[in-house]
Image: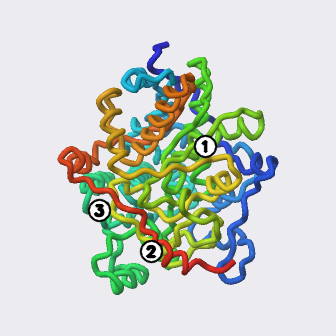
Amino acid sequence: MSQYKYLLDEKSIPTHWYNIAPDMAAAGSPLPPPIHPATHQPIGPEALAPLFPMALIQQEVSTERNISIPDEVREVYKLWRPTPLYRAHRLEQALQTPAHIYYKYEGISPAGSHKPNTAVAQAYYNREAGIKRLTTETGAGQWGSALAMACNFFGIELKVYMVRVSYQQKPYRRIMMETWGAKVLASPTNETNAGRSILAQDPDSPGSLGIAISEAVEEAATRDDTNYSLGSVLNHVLLHQTVIGQEALQQMELAGEYPDVVIGCVGGGSNYAGLALPFMRERLVEGKKTRFLAAEPEACPTITRGEYLYDFGDTAGTTPLMQMHTLGHTFIPAGIHAGGLRYHGMAPVISKLVADGYVQGRAYHQTKVFDAAIQFARTEGIIPAPESAHAIQAAVDEALAAREAGDRRVILFNLSGHGHFDLAAYEQYLSGKLEDYAYPAEKVREAMAGIPKV
């Protein structure tokens, strides 16, 4: 076994997804239920039935700890799973740190990120339910690309509402989705009531994930032949991503070490949950002392500046209310290049773990994040996605703190995707044109004023 790379064989692909909900409940941190926006009462499965197949709804509310992965899904996973775990020796040397830095690399999937872990599962369950057509949103395009690939595999038509600023910044992501057969529109559009309402207020709206979700949900809810698919936030999405952390547990054992801190970037929470939740189980159930650190953009600091309240998951207010860290469902973040992190809310699972002190948040400006991305590319050779670079910056901070303290802490982070379609952002950084955005306090106050009173 190389001291740089820790590999598993196909037999090590998990056979079950891990559901943390029962372990959180047993530890005194039960998840608050989603509630109806009018009655403020917990919703039942029927509220989600117009959007999702029953198999996914059952996973969303499941109290089972382990949920079997269908054989057909595992067969598709074999195209790229298990993914490698690397030790970043060259980065350690550059930082002159005694810390050991490991990263789980999800960028080897055909779509270039962690997103296919749930896209394949969601496409499979919709196909099994007889669904022929899906709608979805995407920010930077990682989720849209993954679902386009998965829908192609399972014979499902896909329509993607892509946040306008990312649609303009990342044309090759759009082309990638179209190559796999998806139809891609720049959101907000004139095709939905939600989109038309936003454009009436601001014809030049850069869009947001909340707006794109509203458009995709509206279309799915008003067509009998169409379901909706979400790439982050919801419990069943985080569930599917836990293949990452389950593999990483095995690989850290191969390396003969265990992480002192587990790090990931957070927008809606899916990639971080995928790595962190299996390790969080070890803390909740086995008493491990691991710290958990979530890195987010200063321009959209949901964990570090948001409030833990019930709010809508979309801008138009068509979803159930979820208790989560939020900046307000009408908040539209600045056009940072980490488009996948431009979301006003945080997954209820991650939010509850933050609220109860198990996860800490840290926010960064994008120029600092690109500093870390360049250093990582020049030491480890991989050009990271701007989203993933937030996790790299947090890992660098931990490694430098270890150098100052003289301790050999073990750091594990999720490198959730590559940045091959983000080179325009790197060009801006290298030419000195990349801008930071101040925390938009006034815009957040305006958005928070519109949160439902629960």
Residue 364: x and y in percent read 43, 50
* Residue hosting label 1: 70
Residue 181: x and y in percent read 32, 56
Spatial CA distance of label 1 from label 3 is: 34 Å
Residue pushed farthest front? 404
Disc with the residue nearer the chain's start (1 vs 3): 1
Question: Total number of numbered labels?
Answer: 3
Is 42 above or below relative to 16? below
Spatial CA distance of label 1 from label 2 is: 47 Å
To which quarter of the image does residue 262 belong?
A: top right
Q: Amino acid at mark 3?
A: Tyr
Residue 315: x and y in percent read 48, 75
Task: Kindly identify which numbered label has been placed on residue 393.
Answer: none
Q: Is residue 234 left or right of residue 380?
A: right
The foreground one among 74 and 381 is 381
* Residue hosting label 2: 442
* Residue hosting label 3: 167
To which quarter of the image does residue 292 belong?
A: top right
Q: Nearer the viewer, mark 1 or mark 2?
A: 2
Q: Is residue 62 left or right of residue 150?
A: right
Location of the C terminus by quadrant is bottom right
Q: Is residue 261 left or right of residue 179?
A: right
Residue 411: x and y in percent read 54, 30
Q: Amino acid at mark 1?
A: Pro
Element type where label 3 sits in the image? helix
